Image: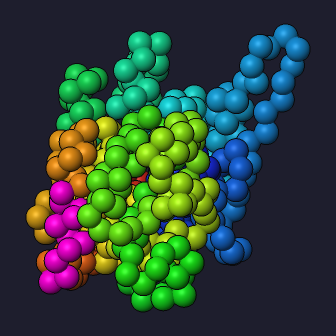
Amino acid sequence: MRIGISCYPTVGGSGAVATELGKALAHKGHQVHFIVTDVPFRLGEFHQNIFVHEVETTSYPVLRTPPYDFSLAALMADIISQYDLEVLHVHYALPFAVSAFLAKQMVPDHPVRVVTTLHGTDVTVLAQDKSLYNVIRLGIEKSDYVTAVSNSLVSQTKELFETDKFIQCVYNFVDTELFHPVNDVRLRGCFAQPEEKILLHISNFRKVKRITDVIDIFARVNEQIPSKLLFVGEGPELPAARTLVKEYRLDGRVRFLGNQDEVAPLLAAADLFILPSEKESFGLVALEAMACSIPVVGSNAGGIPEVVIHGETGYLADVGNTEEMASYAIRLLSDPELYQRFAQAGRLRAQAHFSIHDKISEYEDIYERLTQGVQI
Ligand code: GMT
């Protein structure tokens, strides 16, 4: 098939999922066209079935802001016609589903079908803003098919927009050959002494990630079990995190590694992944940790409980309850038998329920049914 994909190309779960989906589809022989502002961060090596079309925006003195969403829509329309796309799969309602809707108006005779995947923030954060609610709703309503990355996000979307539109849950996925357990003593040695445990958090440091909770949990754990905390990522809460680390006098125990292209080795080198988010539609990085046999301790927000099974592959507590999260972390880190059980169960769960091969087939099935006009 000829498939267009639009996503945010920067570091983040939705970009990672869209890019891995495109790569996997291309490897299966589909022609994949990324319509993006920049080359997606996980695209990697050249592949003959992958084309990248970058949106160019011009700014004119009369316009206060560059007309990015319109340039995107115009480029989508061009690519739809030029390559005779059968499907345009956009990741995020805003702006992609709306731009795709506009693009379709520009090529009214073309049978391209638009699939929108909701990843969370467009519904749980942006749609709370009155000025964006209706435009996000339009993008969802006008899509030919809508998926969301967890059942929690399906329910939240239906409730918030009071819509009867069918929304299919297609879980995110992980490549368990890329994300797998490794006993890399050398890498561990870069961060911790052999007797110390390594706690890890990876995110874009937005407020919803509750970075200060990560530090609070770590401080409590470190009082009982000598540990190190690694932070991967950058974002608005980074200065607050640095300040709190200083206040807690944990400077020597916490490392900020910034954005990293390759997170799999870091996940595999850690002992515990911490994800205390206030909102999280899925928590892709928790799944990646589980695939590396790293248990997760975090909050039971949004879709996290659909990924991390409390008492089996990790422990979850209410948002903000850092005391309970810390006690779970201590329980896991001080009981090797329990730890091993959780570590193995996480990997097995990732393989059994979130395999990249199964999820790619689910998307292919949607594309085929849509283009063949099967009533869905
Ligand atoms: O978590 C973020 O802030 C990044 C965001 C994104 O746009 O990439 O992640 C969202 O999509 C991911 C992939 O579907 C999900 O795993 C994350 O849970 C979701 N983030 C939120 O819902 C806050």
Q: Is residue 320 left or right of residue 43?
A: left
x, y (%) of residue 53? 72, 52
Q: Report which quarter residue 340 is drawn in.
A: bottom left
Q: Does the magenta portion include 333?
A: yes
Relative to residue 321, is residue 365 depicted above or below? below
Relative to residue 241, is residue 359 depicted above or below? below
Front-most of residues 165 and 371: 165
Front-most of residues 220 and 153: 220
Q: Does the magenta portion include 69?
A: no
Residue at 16% x, 77% y is 335
x, y (%) of residue 84? 62, 53
Residue at 58% x, 48% y is 234
Relative to residue 288, is residue 130 depicted above or below? above
Front-most of residues 224 and 158: 224
| Residue reaching furthest to the right | 61
Q: Report which quarter residue 321 is drawn in.
A: top left
x, y (%) of residue 32? 59, 62
Q: Is residue 34 left or right of residue 187?
A: right
Front-most of residues 86 and 88: 88
Q: Is residue 158 left or right of residue 90?
A: left
Numbered range of the magenta stretch:
327-337
- Asked whether residue 47 is in view, the answer is yes
Q: Report which quarter residue 190 is drawn in.
A: bottom right
Relative to residue 303, is residue 137 depicted above or below? above
Residue at 61% x, 65% y is 261
User: Is the magenta region chiefly helix, strand or loop?
Assistant: helix
Query: What colour scheme does the image use?
Result: rainbow
x, y (%) of residue 271? 35, 73
- Asked whether residue 373 is in view, the answer is no
